[in-house]
Image (cartoon, helix red, strand yellow):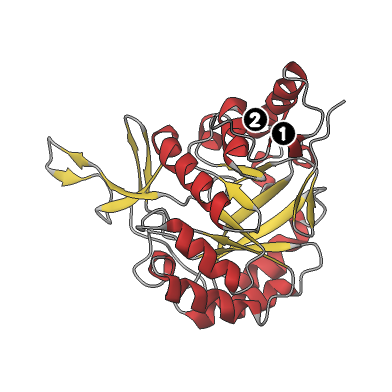
Amino acid sequence: MVNLEVKLKDMILKNPVMTASGTFGYGEEFEDFIDISQLGGILVKGTTRHHREGNPYPRMAETPSGMLNAVGLQNKGVEYFCNNIYPRINHYDTNILVNVSGSVIEDYVETAAMINELDKIPAIELNISCPNVKEGGMAFGTSCASAASVVRAVRKVYKKHLMVKLSPNVTDIAEIAKAVEAEGADSVSLINTLLGMAIDSETRRPLLSTITGGLSGPCVKPVALRMVWQVAQAVNIPVVGLGGIMNAKDAIEFILAGATAIQIGTANFIDPQVSVKIVEGIKDYMIRHQVSDINDLIGAINLK
C-alpha cells in the first residue's frame, strides 16, 4: 500500500492527479469513461462573469507536435454555472475547482465572490494567463504589478483556496509567482499554453481565425518542466504542474521537479481514461522504487 494523498495548503487531494480546465468539460462528459472519484480533483471549464460566445471558427488546429487552440473562453457565465451546472456535479467525490477568467478586474472579483458561496467548491483557479482573449486574460499575467492587482482584489472577496494559473509567455515566471504569493495566493499552477501560430502553405492562410493561439501537448513539456522547477525554488506555496503530461512518467518528472500535484490537459482529448491510468502508473512507479509516500518524491530531483 502506498500513500498518494497530498495537500495544497488546506486542501487535501486523495492523489496528485487533476484534470486541466478546458480539456475535461464539467466532468459529466467523462462519466461514461472513468470513475471521477478516482481523481485528486477536476478543474471545470473556464467561467466568466457574463456569457461568452468565444472566438470565430476555426479555433482548433493540430500541429506535428501539439495542438493549437483559440476557443476564447466560451461559456454561459457564472450565474448559469451556479444555477444549472453546479447542482448537477456537486455530488462528485473529488475536489471541484472552477477556473475563473475575466476581461477586467471587476469581472474576476464578481465571479469569484459568487463561487465563494458554493459549498462544494473548495477552490478556484484564477486564470490570468489565457492567450486567447482580446482583453484581460494573459495581459494580467505578464507583469508582476498587474498579476498582483488581480490577486489582491480577488483575495478580498474569495475566502477559500486561491490557485493562480501563470503564463509561460513572460521573461521571468518566478518573479510573477512571487508577486501573487505576496498578495495571498494559496498555490500556483503552471504553465498555461504557449502563444503559437500555424499556416496552411497551400491557401497561405493561418489555420486559426485569430491567427495566433495557445500551443499545448508534448512539445511544451520541457518548457513547462523547467518553469515548474524554477517556480518551486522561488515560492513557499504549493506548485501545480501542467504542460504536455501524457503519461505517468511525465507526471513523476513534474513531481520530482517540485510539483505537489499535476494537471492533465491535451492528453484527455486523445484518451479519456488517461487521468486514471496516470494514477495507477504513479502507484506502479512508487512500488517499483520502494517509495511509500508520494510526498517524498516532491522536489526530489537529484542534481548531484
Amino acid beneath label 2:
Gln
Helix, strand or loop at label 2? It is loop
Badge 1: residue crowd in 10 Å (few <14, some 14–19, many ≥20)? some
Q: Nearer the viewer, residue 301 or 66?
A: 301
Please determine whether, in this image, residue 147 is positioned above or below residue 207.
below
The image quadrant of residue 300 is top right
Residue 34: mark in rendering: 1
Count of picture labels: 2
Q: Residue 257: percent from the left, percent from the top? A: 57, 39
The image quadrant of residue 282 is top right
Quarter of the image with the C terminus is top right
Q: Earlier in the sequence, mark 1 or mark 2?
A: 1
Task: Please name the residue that numbered disc 2 is placed on.
Answer: 273
Residue 135 vertical placement versus 259 (above, below): below
Q: Position of residue 182 (x, y in %)?
A: 59, 72
Secondary structure at badge 1 equals loop
Residue 139 seen: yes
